[in-house]
Image (cartoon, coloured by chain):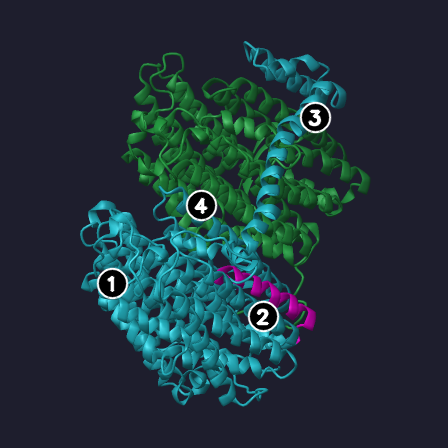
Chain colours: A cyan, B green
Amino acid sequence: MEQTVEYAHATGTLSGIWLLVAIPLASAAILLLLGKRADKWGHWLGVLAVAASFVLGLVFFIKLGGLDAEHRSAELSMWDFIAVGNLHVDFGLLFDPLSGVFVLLITGVGSLIHLYAVGYMEHDPGRRRFFGYFNLFVAAMLLLVLGNNYVMLYFGWEGVGLASYLLISFWYGRPSAATAGKKAFLMNRVGDTGLAIGIFIMFATLGSTQYSDVFSNVGALSSTTVLVLGILLLLGAAGKSGQFPLQAWLPDAMEGPTPVSALIHAATMVTAGVYLIARSNHIFSANHTLQTIVVSVGAFTLLMGCIIGSAKDGIKRVLAWSTVSQIGYMFLGVGLGGGAYALAIIHLVAHGFFKANMFLGAGSVMHGMHDEEDIRRFGGLRKHMKWTWLTFMMGWLAIIGIPPLSGFFSKDPIIEAAYARGDWTSWLFGTAALLGAGLTAFYMTRLFVLTFHGPERYTEQNKHPHESPFIMTVPLMLLALGSIVAGFLLSRHSAIPQWLEPVTGEGEHDPVMPAAVISILVLVVSVAGAGLAWALFSKGTALQEQPAGAVVTAARRNLYTDAFNEAVFERPGIYLTRALVFLDNKGIDGLVNGIAAGVGGSSGRLRRLQTGFVRSYALSMLTGVVLVVGAFLAIQLGWLA
Amino acid sequence: MSDFPFLSILTLLPLVGAVVVGVIPRRKAELAKTIALIWSLVVLVLSIFMWVAFKIDGDRFQFHESYQWIPSWDARFTFAADGIALVMLMLIAVLTPVVILASWHDVDGDGKRSAPVYFALLLAFEFTMIGVFAAADIFLFYVFFEVMLIPMYFIIGSFGGARRQYAAVKFFLYSLVGGLFMLAAVIGLWVVGGHTFDFSKLLQSVGEIDQNTSRWLFLGFFVAFAIKAPFFPFHTWLPDAGGAAPAGAAALLVGVMDKVGTFGILRYCLPLFPEASRWFAPAALVLAVIGIIYAALLAVGQNDLKRLVSYTSIAHFGFIGIGIFAFTTQGGTGSVLYMVNHGLATGLLFIVVGMFVARRGSSLVSDFGGAGKLVPVLAGVLFFAGLASLALPGTAPFISEFLVLIGTFTVHKVYAVIATVGIILAAAYVLWMVQRTTQGTLNPALEEVPAMRKDITLREKVVVAPLILLLLLLGFYPKPVTDVINPAVQATMQDVGTTDPGPTAVTANGRAAR
């Protein structure tokens, strides 16, 4: 435990890492401040800013790779952010293997999605504003992963929350979009309090919020403190990543434009929770109970996401619940600890590609179908949108985990690692993850088949579906390519595990079954799930919601989690607020007025004031003056005579 | 430069300005406004010079001046400023010209009310505010404390909105009652404190006062300040006053004048009655924490924009309260910074709300709806002000709220945790307000109001720009302000006799001090 964590100072090229954040931030400021004057070219500036960050990120990444493993990090303190008493917080950045991977994911996938959005938002009068918010998001997200202390992380953390809010409620004229944005922000803030209190604990016990100080001294903390601290960080992570019990905002977030769903609510922001836990691995690895809690949250959420996803009919809703479920896998991974940290990160990057790919594919489908979202009204689209179909297929095969696509290399090892946890819980979590693989195959196949295959079930206005323009399909192709190769490339020769080793350390258990057996099991379960869905849905489906048993009904209602939130928090909250408003007006105010009137000996006067019958304030003013003068006289006569 | 009598000139300058503007005939309204604006800008420039002349590592109290007043009582015109007073003086100097420009058309097109009088009252109010922060003689402080009611009373009572007279009288009576408590305590202090009103002399002599008397004196001051701040349960005058006052004046009322309460606690209660402060701290903390949650819930439930902002302020004062009574450097510095930031953020919020109200002719939330379609830029400014109010990182209030909470947490975990829940409620009241006024489907009635179709004007841009800039600047780089506040707060904590707890898990703090 007594290990010292130190980061090397940023020197040479690497001292320019601040540019990564500054460029998109400056672009966002320009786009939002110039207003209509930037309407013509604003979107291109937005794309350019993210692409520039990507190129820079690549340069820094290569530079970082050139350093030896001992010193593979670059810490840059820019200025004293907060310096009060013994509290010192840097406005500082840290570029190390972990943040490097995130930088490339955010700016790389981000650039493609920005490019796609140029086409997707072409007819939207608010396109410039959209790119302003989009750039703001990228800047905040980069700050989140690049901060060198928890306060910086929190800064970016709330920043991405703001950007997410702005983009979910981008079409603010729609009440549903406005409500969804607010819901996202509020549920995130619930998680944020966890993160905030966690930071307070760090300062109270360790006297610092710098990563290097905190990680070096975790060993000094009592195991209860570590547990509490970890649970609070987990609360923050769950809020941002849509994990149980703070998952409800994520599916509603699909009210935003589709590129937003792809970038923020699939590929990057929602993985911030995974980043937080991976970054804090020194804390989480220090307490086994804590790890069990993280694993449980991951396993529970991954199953929950699968079950609900199987019952949804909106193309983006299914993908959203799929995201909840896939991040569940990542939480499972980071909760397992040791070498599984790296596995979670591999899955995170791979997921970033294939989920962004499918979200943009969904956007392309909606683009050609008058914004129709209901998969029951699709069917046979493979004939009309060849590229969308082909690219989406890659995403679909990747998420199911068909070798040699991404998911096979990224999800399988997590399931294996779950089976290798080391005690009886191996069976529990391993089997949950295995079951999840089957369910994933089922709902994703249902989505794919109902959209692209089977009979056409279009509404009246959708007689002529069409393929999207190149500016949208080219990003799709690139992301599809990523969906195919990312998993293989990242895990080949343990590229990512070795790369991350300076950050996360390593560690292996033996699984309860031979790895090959688990692999075959996963494949069998997945193929079975996919086959079942294909058999059920290749002939199409009913156009209306059919009566269903308890399980399906519960899944359609999000397992009653929304109903629970409404009954336990929302409605009592509204009643409490109303009661307090009444109490404050009648009770406290009345009481204080009453006392004041009683003391003044003129109870009728205030009541008349309340009913508004005072014709002149002169009288009351005079009373005041008399009181003051009287008091002065009292001094003069009583005390100073 | 430091021999220059900054404080007396700074105090008197707006008073002279008020007289000059006040005697301008009513029909020359534009002239009166222009002079008032220029005058307040001169005050601002002088304040900036004073800020530069202030030595961070110099004496605790600087710019000391003293002139004879009532020798038999040893009451003198004594002025001096520590870092806490300095930042408050700077705040009032910044806000006054902004408010004057924001109120430019508040009294237009109205035969009954006189524009020169209104702007004279704003300058007179600035005079009393500067006086109350600059005074270093308790009797002088008390006089300013009472006199500052008068201009605000007339601003609310004569230039306010609906129920203005009820609100004005209520405001006056509440403050007056508080003032009487303080008067009793001031006199008591004079009697037991060696027959002087001089703050620095009293600071030497208060050690002699016996415990019981000291606690009573503390209570007298505290009640006055708690009403002024206001803390729960003395708060009910504020929503009425804030709701009825013209928006610009409300910005001054809530943004600066209420801070006299928390300033007074820090400046007078804590150093003069250290033992009593520690003794009363648990009660004060409980009131502050209740205020944070209670007022935030009430803010959620308001249907009047100005009352809503007033309630948010009461919640914010709760944060200031816990920061003060936590007796840690972070809590104290956080509280003072909170006073400044809250003045800027809530000032901006009131001013923007005023721009909406002026267009719509109503401050009821339900009279808006979907306004973002008509006035997108103004809606954006409202949203920004809301973000500052909910203490989003990147805006200045984040720093102060963070400092208050982290400073409180090191000594009172439970209170800090409950207060942290308040940040969820802050998001709720801000976002819900933004949603109901600017988002969703456009309220058809709104479209029929011609003024609602005009987005932010150039004058309005000039009004909001400096506040937005300051909020962002201090959100990223608060050091210039915290460096000024820090020594004063540390001196105050020394007076109280408390020290910051060190980190509990590591013995040496060497690594953290980077």
Q: Are marks 4 and 3 on the same chain?
A: yes
Give the percent coordinates (x, y) of residue B174: 63, 26
Q: Which residue is mark 4?
A: A179
Of the numbered discs 4 and 1, the one sitting upstream in the chain is: 1
Vertical placement of B247 versus A514: above or below? above
In this rendering, does residue A581 appear at all?
A: yes
Q: Residues within 10 Å of mark 1 (few under 14, many from 20)?
A: many
Of the numbered discs 1 and 3, the one sitting upstream in the chain is: 1
Q: Are marks 4 and 1 on the same chain?
A: yes
* Residue at mark 1 to residue at mark 3: CA–CA distance: 63 Å
* Residue at mark 4 to residue at mark 1: CA–CA distance: 28 Å
The amino acid beneath tag 4 is Thr
* Residue at mark 1 to residue at mark 2: CA–CA distance: 36 Å
**Chain under disc 3:** A
Q: Which residue is mark 2?
A: A294
Q: Which residues are magenta?
A: A220-242
Of the numbered discs 4 and 3, the one sitting upstream in the chain is: 4
Helix, strand or loop under label 2 = helix
The amino acid beneath tag 1 is Leu
**Chain under disc 4:** A
Relative depth, front residue between A189 and A366: A366
Viewer-nearest of labels 4 and 1?
4
Helix, strand or loop under label 3 = helix
Which residue is found at the position 39% from the left and 21% from the top? B20
Left or right of residue B216, residue A243 in this image: left
Give the percent coordinates (x, y) of residue B322: 64, 47
Relative depth, front residue between A176 and B390: A176
